Amino acid sequence: MSGGIAAYKSAEIVRLLRKQGCEVRVVMTASAQRFVTPLTFQALSGQTVHSDLFDIAQEQAMSHIHLARWADALLIAPASADLLAKMAHGLADDLLSTLCLAAQCPVYLAPAMNQAMWQHPAVKDNLALLRQRGVRVIGPASGEQACGEQGLGRMSEPSAICDVLMATDTTALLAGRKVMITAGPTREPIDPVRFISNRSSGRMGYAIAEAARDAGAQVTLVSGPVALPSPHGVRVIAVESAKAMHDGVMRRIDDCDIFIGAAAVADYRPAQVADAKLKKHDDTLAIVLEKNPDIIATVASLARKPFVVGFAAETDDLERYALGKLRDKNLDMIAANWVGQAEGGFDSERNALDVYWPGGHQALAMADKRELARRLILLIAQRRNENHTT
Ligand code: PMT
């Protein structure tokens, strides 16, 4: 626990985790102890609370290295802006920050801070760096804050944090599996300087790639042009057009176990690409388009077909169109999302999905795309296992 008014909620996290059979050891920074007392956490966890890097008595019993080795997961709740900065830069001047460096288990953060602090570019950069290194971020939630302001930044509810911690213990869920994911938009050239494209940022596909990697899979990400850093430990194949994405996928699909098509692939491309920049003449200009290959349908028609998960991006009649694509493209599962709304879909940090498979449906509620991707990977792994055992 680092310092923050949300520290009082961490008592409930300890209680819920213990109820689910977890052993919990609590490490508190000096600031955390200004908000709540170690005694509360000692009573709830049934264990001595650790706080001092240089406490001789505690060091003899269990040093930061021992604590790091002991834990199956490290959850920092609340995670303050200061703690994020220390983690991002590798500072280690107290027990908690030292533990963060020593930990080799999955690390989860439940950030809690004022909404303006959460929006600050320094916090965003630190968080992006930590995510890139594989740290998993739960929340924050939106709503009224202790300071009286409204917005994103309050710590997620204890039950939501525990759900993520327990449900996304996916570490070995896809161990040894080969997963290919497409992400981002495609660009269909008109002439040497112009193209047709769409609003996909790649965030959804990149988050899925990270979640699959965290679940132990060997991940190949075939990506259209995006402004995102390559996820650590993921093989990224950069492409531009739908045809190049098709070729990039088909060249590597052979021994793939799971294929997830999160890319917004252009359905059509200009039939003729001009060699020189088109000049302005008439009041109107007609460009003839021809159909692109349907990548996911091609993958789903292979003799040795992987488990194929498609996406459906719709502005209307979501369920009907999604079920139509599930059937017509011979998919095993489809994740449907609304696009063109105020929140979710294209170029948004958050999204919600309705996931359908033959005879089944599960709604994944609005959440940060990384959190959503973890839930989706869990569902995919469950469905794939059921398919293999029936
Ligand atoms: O990238 P973000 O900004 O994070 O936004 C995420 C997203 C909205 C792009 C993503 O969640 C999403 O919905 N991706 C699929 C978008 C899309 O093209 O949907 P579609 O309904 O047009 O296509 C259906 C499926 O066929 C998709 O799996 C698509 O990848 C695939 N497809 C489509 C055309 C084509 N030629 N080849 C394909 O493989």
Image (spheres, helix red, strand yellow):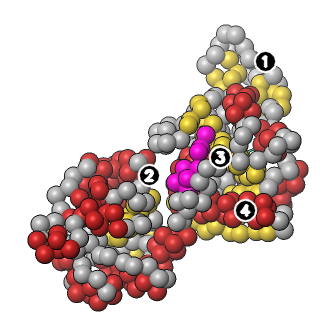
CB-based contact (under 8 Å), mark 3 and mark 4: no
Of labels 3 and 4, earlier in sequence is: 3
Of labels 3 and 1, earlier in sequence is: 3
Q: Find disc 2 in the rendering and name its residue.
A: 134
- Identity of the residue furthest to the front in this view: 60
Q: Find disc 4 in the rendering and name its residue.
A: 385
Q: Amino acid at mark 4?
A: Asn
Q: Residues within 10 Å of mark 2 (few under 14, many from 20)?
A: some
Label 3 – label 2 distance at C-alpha? 17 Å
Label 2 – label 1 distance at C-alpha? 43 Å
Label 3 – label 1 distance at C-alpha? 35 Å
Residue 247, numbered label: none
Q: Find disc 3 in the rendering and name its residue.
A: 179
> Does residue 210 appear to the left or right of 22 in the view shown?
right
Q: Find disc 1 in the rendering and name its residue.
A: 272
> Does residue 24 appear to the left or right of 264 in the view shown?
left
Of labels 2 and 4, earlier in sequence is: 2
Q: Amino acid at mark 1?
A: Gln
What SS does tag 2 mark?
Answer: loop
